[in-house]
Amino acid sequence: MELQFLGTGAGMPSKTRNTSALLLNLTAEGRGYWLFDCGEATQHQILHTSLKPRKIEKIFITHLHGDHLFGLPGLISSRSFLGGNEPLHIYGPRGLKEWLFSTLNMTNTHLNYPLEIHEITEEGLVIEESDFTVSVRSLQHVIPCFGYRIEQKPLPGKLLIEKAIEIGVPKGPLLKELKEGNDVTLPDGRVILSELVTGPPQPGFVVAILGDTKYCQAAVDLSKNADIIVHEATFDNETGTLAQEYGHSTIGDAATVAKQADAKALIANHISARFLPSDLAQLKKQGQAIFEPLYIAEDFLCYVWKNGVLIETKNHVR
């Protein structure tokens, strides 16, 4: 699993940060891309990477502020031009469908694929699939805003290959079936249960991606025991009054949520343009005084979650 940041700024674009967009790359899990928010010029940001818009399967909008969705009409239109013909599912607050379809209709935009918009009207489970679930909670912003919790279901346990061979499973595709959790029938008619030759199921990953919010208990609950939390940190600790006034969080608020949720790692996002690159070390220091495994998101940074370890890399920019 990879988290690829396309826009990490707050409110409006700056020279170093575009507006909000975060892509969850699930190709290693046999899926496509899930995009969280789609601020202005998100598709232009994608052009600077090796990402393919036609692989976007789902888009999740946290709330209806422009810096989180003004890039949506252009992106879904370009997806059509670029050969995307698979259905696209978009999730977000009430009003998203009216705004988006009005824009597409007024501009006579034609899509070559089915577009399904799912307006979220209550907290709880919004997606239940064979390998993933997605649930939402309402956060505390100046307009309705959601946070999303993405949970990968448990993975098959490790194949005990020596044991499998000992009971007569030949090398080849039957071993692969057993590893994937499927029972198999041997040439001699015996049925081998996967559970007999595999270890216990391995836990999947949990990621909490939160929209704009001030500190709230819902953010903590949504992030409970998450491997990674992506939480806004629009302000530093010295400007906490402004954060409260505008429904945003300080770096300290984000770190407090991560600590109370017993998370493994926090990526602070939605950084105000008031903070120059030279200010980020101090911002990070403020957060790490509360929660140590803390990272500051930047445009085009990529975070890879592999074997329980978060690895920060710089995405190649064309």
Image: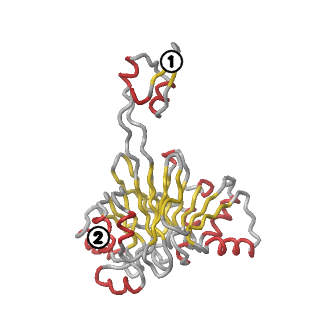
> Looking at the image, which residue is at 49% across and 31% down?
182
In this image, 133 relative to 256: left or right? right
Identify the residue shown where x is 46% and y is 20%: 171
Secondary structure of the residue carrying numbered label 2: helix
Q: Residue flagged by tag 2: what amino acid is it? A: Thr
Front-lying residue, 174 or 288:
174
Percent of width and height locating residue 51? 55, 56
For the residue carrying disc 2, how many other residues have a C-alpha within 10 Å: few (<14), some (14-19), or many (20+)? some
What secondary structure is marked by label 1?
Answer: loop
Q: Which residue is the extreme one toward the right? A: 108
The amino acid sitting under disc 1 is Leu
What residue is disc 1 on?
186
Which one is nearer the viewer's eye here, 24 or 225? Answer: 225
Position of residue 41 measured from the top left corner of the image (x, y, whole percent):
57, 71
For the residues marked 2 and 1, what is the alpha-carbon distance in whole angstroms? 54 Å
Marking on residue 265: none
Q: Residues within 10 Å of mark 1 (few under 14, many from 20)?
A: few
Q: Position of residue 65 (x, y in %)?
A: 54, 78
Which residue is the extreme one toward the left? 289
Viewer-nearest residue: 253 or 125: 125
**What is the quadrant of residue 311 in the picture?**
bottom left
Say which residue appears at 39% left-offset and 56% top-offset: 313
Give the labeled residue for mark 2.
Answer: 256
